[in-house]
Image: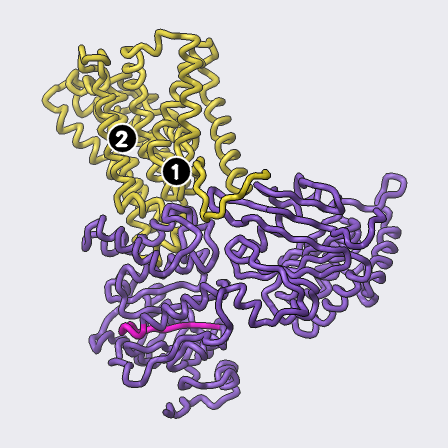
Chain colours: A purple, B yellow
């Protein structure tokens, strides 16, 4: 193909796709020129991965056309797309850890001599290939399982190039990389560009989108909002396109001291197999943040309060009355709700409808209390109030984005009018828009008098949302920090470099 | 597509829901047409009514099995439970009509008890239900042999047998409506209502994701135990109809558990739980019976029944597995 340069490598026109009647892509136009890095950004659920799967042959579009290298194509599957020259590097790699680099690169199309795999030829070709993208330190005969993440990514890229990929899709390529490895990826991307390979670059991280891309396409709710030249835009503008508002005013206002009510939940020397001597007070009207490292006992604390693995020692009082929270049911009857960390494994019943998911707890525990019809009406209202988008109430919940699933889970608990809410990583894996909706909701609940305990590994979130922060370490409370604490203070308590005393709650 | 694209989101498209009853209705319709071509008499109201009556026991068992399967478990004990019930009924009634009703109640209680034990062993002792109910199957077989010294004793009263063999005569339009069909309709309506109730929705949720259900306050063990009890009760009702229709033998319930499981799977219910409708399971049983009737009309050997069942199970599971992974 010796067409003049302006001919795009890839042209998408009017791409549309629906799953079970829900439109996830609608009228998408996009093109990529040879040697161009075209970034695609958008919230989770905006349709990025579906679009990438259409380009790489994983799905076929319901509407619209895909033109590749000047010809209309409809790929019959990922292999078909690969043969045509479209490679995709997924977030999770697709490598055989027990095989060598060369074996992985040529997997399925090994060079053959006299009917046998030509090992030496394969190694030589792999070396050349790696050298051609400036990768000289990676041994072609190393076992892939021994390589670091960044090197494995190089192997993935080499694999695509071995199939003569002319268009490469990178889906969140830096998600798994350390900071210094990101630099290496930048170098690699530039060398791919020099070879005339077109790149579709999907990422959440706006910094790298600005570093690498020449054009940016923003998707929202399955539609293309805009395509801009990177040089002509700013991060703020992009975020506005993505969520429809600016980046500032991110967290809702905290509770004023006078809004904090009496102590709802009081733990004295409480402990179980994973926790010891936990002393903690949770007040009405406040958001108590729980910080700490993975495995420090944060989730164990929430699960003990909710009766999943109850406290075996110490005293628990609820509104000054001693209680034993032996099971989720007893906790729920006491007015406690628990939004789990593992939404997929413990938060949703995936193949049931949105409505059935939202009704699950009411049906299980308070079935006799209210009329069925009234309950359903109320839950439908709640689903509207938490703004579950892009799905009817009869839609199976597994087809919703993470953020919408979480809103349904919230509606399930709000239907019980809980007075104590335990949130375990409430916004993990959720897109920006849904995240701030959940933040607003959490704060509104506290303002209405609920006592909120919120576990978060996301430090800006923890600091932005909490009225106080309790940091856990090794199953006990390492210390307490007031609102306005810094990330450093939290981390110091979490890893144990700070002295274990509560800082004076100033202000 | 060069037309102007609709801009409204989400777009409503008529769709075949996974776990819905449309596929099984389609299969049933095709079979009915095939039967009609080969044996038009079969579609006359009277023979259709008696076919439905004959099929009532397996349809009831399919409904019972549905509750267990949709909650994520299995019940392999129903076939031998039916046998045990029939043998027990014959010995206890011993041809005395006065004992009919007490024994009917006893059979229902016994079915519920077996279900309760199955449920408690599975949920509280954490024995996989496959093993629990296989054990119960063997226990019942052995116990019945032992109790009756190797040959069924006594006999059923005519009062007892009428459930399975008598009918309302001269019903307008339909002609002869077997009692068994009336029992079936009553149970079917009850089953559908149950699945629309809080319990029913919770039961499916338990099968879909027991962790989530537990953390939402569901007593998963109780819910599943109730499902086993319902299966035991269904087996009791099926035994009463079957004993009346085909009499007392150690073979009365042989193989019915697999028939019921095949029917449930055929009806679009996911093995492992969480998806499918009770109506689908019952239609699955009807379809299976119709298929056997069809095989009969075409002179296919009855010996092929179990082969056909096995093939259906494999095919139905394979179809649903590939469909759900290709989303």
**In front of the other: B91 or A70:** A70
- What chain does badge 1 belong to? B
Residue shown at the point (41%, 40%) measured from the top left: B130
Side of A253 where A121 appears, left or right? right
**Residue sitting at the far front:** B4
Label 2: chain letter: B
What residue is rendered at 44% in x and 85% in y?
A484
In-front residue for pair A164/B62: A164
Specify the quadrant that holds the C terminus of chain A.
bottom left
- The answer to whether A492 is drawn above or below residue A299 in the figure is below
| B304 left or right of A112 in image | left
Near mark 2 (Cα within 10 A), the count class, few <14, some 14-19 or many ≥20, is: some
Q: How far across and down, in percent of the image, does residue A358 sit?
A: 34, 54
Res. B290 mark: none
> Is residue B141 in sight in this rendering?
no
Return the disc, 1 or 2, that comes first in the chain's sequence.
2
Assess whether residue A456 is covered by the magenta stretch.
Answer: yes
Position of A468 with respect to A70 (left or right) is left
Q: Which residue is depicted at the point 63% across and 57% down?
A: A92
Report the residue marked by disc 1.
B276
The range drawn in magenta is A446-457
Q: What residue is at 40 percent from the left and 51 percent from the top?
A: A349
x and y percentages locating residue B54 in the rendered image: 30, 18
Label drawn at residue B188: 2
Instruction: Identify whether B64 is placed above or below B305.
Output: below
Please tell me in which quadrant of the rendered image residue A451 appears. Answer: bottom left
Q: Position of residue A369 (x, y in %)?
A: 18, 55
Q: Which element carries disc 1, helix, strand or loop?
A: loop
């Amino acid at each position: 193909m010796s067409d003049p340069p302006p001919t795009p490598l890839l042209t998408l026109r009017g791409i549309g796709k629906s799953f079970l009647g829900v439109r996830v892509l609608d009228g998408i136009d996009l093109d990529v020129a040879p040697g161009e890095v075209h970034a695609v950004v958008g919230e989770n659920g905006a349709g990025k991965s579906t679009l990438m799967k259409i380009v790489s042959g994983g799905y076929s579009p319901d509407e619209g056309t895909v033109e590749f290298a000047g010809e209309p194509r409809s790929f019959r599957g990922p292999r078909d797309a690969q043969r045509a020259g479209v490679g995709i590097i997924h977030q999770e790699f697709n490598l055989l850890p027990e095989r060598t680099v060369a074996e992985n690169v040529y997997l399925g199309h090994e060079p053959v001599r006299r009917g046998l795999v030509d090992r030496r030829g394969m190694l030589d070709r792999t070396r050349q290939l790696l050298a051609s993208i400036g990768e000289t330190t990676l041994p072609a005969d190393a076992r892939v399982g021994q390589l670091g993440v960044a090197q494995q990514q190089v192997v993935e890229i080499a694999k695509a190039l071995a199939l003569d990929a002319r268009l490469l899709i990178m889906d969140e390529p830096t998600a798994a990389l350390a900071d210094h490895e990101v630099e290496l990826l930048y170098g690699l991307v530039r060398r791919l560009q020099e070879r005339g390979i077109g790149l579709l670059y999907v990422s959440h991280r706006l910094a790298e989108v600005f570093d690498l891309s020449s054009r940016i396409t923003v998707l929202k709710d399955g539609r293309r909002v805009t395509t801009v030249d990177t040089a002509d835009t700013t991060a703020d503008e992009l975020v506005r396109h993505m969520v429809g508002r600016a980046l500032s005013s991110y967290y809702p206002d905290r509770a004023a001291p006078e809004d904090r009510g009496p102590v709802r939940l009081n733990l004295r020397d409480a402990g179980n197999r994973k926790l010891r001597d936990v002393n903690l007070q949770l007040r009405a009207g406040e958001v108590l943040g729980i910080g700490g490292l993975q495995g420090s006992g944060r989730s164990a604390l929430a699960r003990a309060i909710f009766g999943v693995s109850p406290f075996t020692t110490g005293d628990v009082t609820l509104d000054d009355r001693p209680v034993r929270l032996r099971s989720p049911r007893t906790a729920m009857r006491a007015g406690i709700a628990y939004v789990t960390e593992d939404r997929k494994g413990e938060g949703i019943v995936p193949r049931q409808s949105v409505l059935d998911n939202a009704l699950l707890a009411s049906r299980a525990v308070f079935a006799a209390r209210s009329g069925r019809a009234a309950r359903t009406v109320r839950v439908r209202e709640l689903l509207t109030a938490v703004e579950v988008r892009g799905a009817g109430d009869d839609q199976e919940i597994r087809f919703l984005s993470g953020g919408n699933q979480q809103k349904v889970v919230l509606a399930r608990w709000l239907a019980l009018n809980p007075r104590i809410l335990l949130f375990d990583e409430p916004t993990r894996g959720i897109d920006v828009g849904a995240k701030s909706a959940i933040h607003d909701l959490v704060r509104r609940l506290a303002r209405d008098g609920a006592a909120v305990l919120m576990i978060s590994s996301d430090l800006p979130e923890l600091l932005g949302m909490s009225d106080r922060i309790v940091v856990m370490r090794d199953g006990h409370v390492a210390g307490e920090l007031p609102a306005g604490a810094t990330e450093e203070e939290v981390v110091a308590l979490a890893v144990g470099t700070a002295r274990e005393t509560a800082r004076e709650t100033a202000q | 597509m060069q037309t102007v694209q609709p801009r409204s989101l989400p777009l409503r498209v008529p769709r075949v829901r996974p776990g819905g009853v449309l596929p099984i209705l389609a299969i049933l319709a095709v079979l009915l047409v095939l039967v009609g071509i080969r044996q038009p008499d079969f579609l006359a109201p009277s023979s259709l009514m008696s076919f439905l009556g004959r099929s009532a026991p397996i349809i009831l068992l399919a409904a019972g099995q549905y509750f267990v399967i949709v909650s994520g478990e299995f019940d392999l004990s129903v076939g031998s439970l039916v046998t045990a019930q029939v043998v027990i009924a014959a010995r206890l009634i011993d041809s005395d009509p006065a004992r009919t009703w007490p024994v009917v109640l006893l059979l229902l209680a016994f079915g519920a008890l077996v279900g309760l034990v199955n449920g408690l062993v599975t949920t509280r002792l954490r024995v996989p239900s496959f093993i629990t109910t296989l054990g119960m199957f063997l226990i019942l077989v052995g116990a019945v042999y032992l109790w009756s010294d190797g040959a069924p004793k006594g006999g059923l009263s005519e009062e007892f047998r009428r459930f399975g063999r008598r009918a309302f005569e001269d019903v307008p339009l339909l002609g002869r409506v077997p009692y068994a069909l009336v029992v079936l309709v009553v149970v079917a309506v009850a089953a559908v209502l149950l699945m629309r109730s809080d319990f029913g929705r919770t039961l499916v949720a338990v099968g879909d994701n027991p962790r989530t259900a537990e953390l939402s306050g569901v007593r998963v063990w109780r819910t599943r135990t109730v499902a086993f009890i319902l299966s035991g009760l269904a087996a009791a009702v099926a035994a009463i109809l079957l004993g009346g229709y085909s009499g007392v033998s150690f073979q009365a319930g042989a193989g019915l558990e697999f028939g019921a499981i095949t029917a449930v799977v055929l009806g679009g219910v996911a093995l492992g739980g969480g998806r499918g409708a009770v109506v689908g399971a019952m239609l699955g049983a009807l379809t299976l019976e119709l298929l056997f009737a069809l095989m009969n009309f075409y002179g296919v050997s009855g010996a092929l029944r179990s082969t056909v069942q096995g093939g259906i199970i494999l095919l139905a599971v394979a179809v649903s597995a590939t469909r759900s992974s290709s989303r």
